[in-house]
Image: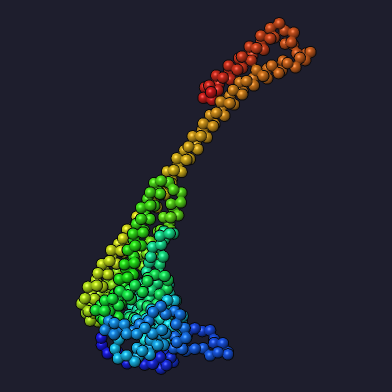
Amino acid sequence: MAERRARPTSKSRGKSAWRRALTPPAPPPPQKQQASPAEAAEAEPASIVQAALYRDGVRVSAPATLAETFRELRDARSGMAWIGLARPTADELLSLAAEFDLHPLAVEDAMEAHQRPKLERYGDTLFVVLRAARYLDAPEEVDFGELHVFVGPDFVITVRHGAAPDLSAVRQRMEETPELLKLGPEAVLYAILDAVVDGYVPVVSGVQNDIDEIETEVFRGDPEVSRRIYELSREMVEFQRATRPLVGMLHGLMAGFSKYGTDEELQRYLRDVADHVTHTSERVDGFRQALTEILTVNATLVTQQQNAEMRALAEAGFEQNEEIKRISSWAAILFAPTLVGTIYGMNFENMPELSWRFGYPFAIGLMGVICVGLYVIFKRRDWL
């Protein structure tokens, strides 16, 4: 590995304008002076997942704090520092920025998180933002994490926001292959990219299984399937945002192979990662298309089911109306003789029909004529 370049101390850089601009605006308590970034790194090592110094692919030291890491890296004539942080504080990031000449815009992004995947070069330092993903079996959903990586001539800094990815496995893999680790920070970046992309594989398998289940639920008429399709579609949008930019990022890295003298073996590894990313991105695009089609099919089936229910309701209403017509018709037919009988049953003295010889046959005949007439009328109108 090449000789380490001379680096000014963090104390000399602490007065730079951009560092003051990134300092949190809250005033320090009156009884206690605000600690400098270097002092904060010494006093608050809680965010450090692991820090180590490597020489020729072999770990030579594992400092407990950022300040110790800075001192040992300055004292070493050659080597590489690999610092892993999880949700670091602003002071810790500022101490790293002062020590390694990190660009303020990149540091600001690492502080705020919620960045899109990207690759930017600031002088001799690469700043990479990655979106890792993992599939959670119990809730059947995709969980996303964010990883920021600073890659310099003799250092790698990872800032993790979220549970994924597990970089301890990446570090172990690299330490077990010193011939790869001795290639320097670019090899570590490759290993991180490879781990993030490999983490997409179980997610793709889990999503494929979910889509198969959704297809079964759609044709089974499950009423909750629409919500599941919508939720999975939103996850696929996030997944697409995580994977699609990686294709361009890796092609950008490959375009700089000659300019930055990337090792030939490392070039092959990065091309392999690019192939896997392209394949994953295509699968995710296919998932989104499949979910869109499934949602369309589900909407069609729901509409057909609703039409069938409306048709059944209409048929039931029609049959009910027919029954009401029949009942009303017979009620009218039976009401006519009842009315005649009621009138002649009043037995008033001045009713001429009471003393008429043919009064009874006339009343019976009148009842019959009215009933037959009503029956014929209702029958012609299809009420009976």
Q: Nearer the viewer, residue 144 or 171?
A: 171
Left or right placement of residue 182 versus residue 300 in this view: left
Quadrant where the N terminus lies? bottom left
Q: Nearer the viewer, residue 309 or 57?
A: 57
> Relative to 278, is 345 above or below?
above
Res 202 seen here: yes
Report the residue at 44% width, 79% height from top. Answer: 47
Question: Where is residue 347 drawn, in percent x and y?
Answer: 76, 14
The answer to whether residue 91 is above or below residue 222 is below
- Colouring method of the image: rainbow
- In this view, which residue lies farthest toward the top? 357
**Foreground residue among 161 and 51:** 51
Residue 58: x, y in percent? 29, 82
Name of the residue lying farthest toward the left:
264
Q: Is residue 33 left or right of residue 170?
A: right
Residue sitting nearer the eye, 269 or 167: 167
Q: Is residue 121 left or right of residue 258?
A: right
Residue at the far right: name it. Answer: 349
Give the answer, above or below, for where 157 lies relative to 5: above
Count of labels in the image:
0
Quadrant hosting residue 363: top right
Q: Is residue 270 above or below residue 42?
A: above
> Is residue 13 in view from this perspective?
no
* Residue occupying image coordinates x 27% and y 90%: 3
Rendering coords of residue 312 (x, y %): 48, 37
Question: In the image, residue 174 lies at what x, y percent?
Answer: 29, 76
> Looking at the image, which residue is at 41% across and 62% down?
136
Q: Residue at x 32, y 58 (%)?
A: 286
Q: Quadrant of residue 203?
A: bottom left
